[in-house]
Image (spheres, rainbow, N blue to C red):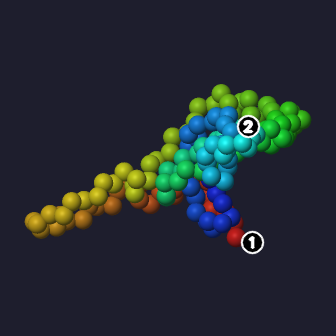
Amino acid sequence: MFVRSTGLGRTLLTGRIGKVVITSLVPATLEEAPNGSKEPKRMLMEMEIQHPVHWTVRAFLDPPDLRSLVKKIITNPGLMMTGLKFLFMKGPRYDVPTSHTAAPQAASTGPAAPPKAASPAAGTPPKGPPPIPSR
């Protein structure tokens, strides 16, 4: 999944959905409600942002939010058909950013290794959506 936020400028985040559960946690504290108080049930969707930072983003959906989402899908036949096709499509394979796979190099006492030649894929444009246009 790709995530963009107006607060992060042109940063493109990549991630995945970690889990979706029904919970009664208090969204502000992520803890159970204190004794004597009752917290309503909500759907919690946890997303793990993997690049360029490692974050866990939690979205709490109230029943009206879920009803609104389902209503928007059901009342738009084009969106429903595209969604059904999308559901059964094979997902694309994206290259893993090199900053994720490169292990930190240990300090050595010997001479430094010569720099590696640039790979042939260095001139290719990055995969994913284009940048957000500036207004």
> Few, some or many C-alpha atoms within 10 Å of disc 1 (few <14, some 14-19, many ≥20)?
few
Instruction: Quadrant for the N terminus, please.
Output: top right
Amino acid residing under circle 1? Arg
In this orientation, does residue 59 appear? no
Residue designated by label 2: 41
Q: Which mark is residue 15?
A: none
Q: Position of residue 88 (x, y in %)?
A: 65, 27
In this picture, is 102 found above or below 41? below
Name the residue nearer the viewer: 21 or 55. Answer: 21
Q: Is residue 50 left or right of residue 111?
A: right
Distance of mark 1 from mark 2, alpha carbons?
40 Å
Q: Residue at x 70, y 45 (%)?
A: 60
Q: Is residue 132 left or right of residue 105?
A: right
Please tell me which of labels 1 and 2 falls first in the chain: 2
Q: Position of residue 30 (x, y in %)?
A: 61, 48
In this orientation, does residue 12 appear? yes
Residue pushed farthest front? 36
Q: Position of residue 68 (x, y in %)?
A: 84, 41
Q: Secondary structure at mark 2?
A: loop
In this picture, is 4 found above or below 45? below
Amino acid residing under circle 2? Lys
Name the residue nearer the viewer: 86 or 106. Answer: 106
Q: Residue at x 44, y 53 (%)?
A: 97
Name the residue nearer the viewer: 121 or 115. Answer: 115
Q: Name which quarter of the figure residue 117 lies in.
A: bottom left
Q: Is residue 11 left or right of residue 54?
A: right
Instruction: Quadrant for the C terminus, please.
Output: bottom right
Residue designated by label 1: 135
Residue pushed farthest left? 110
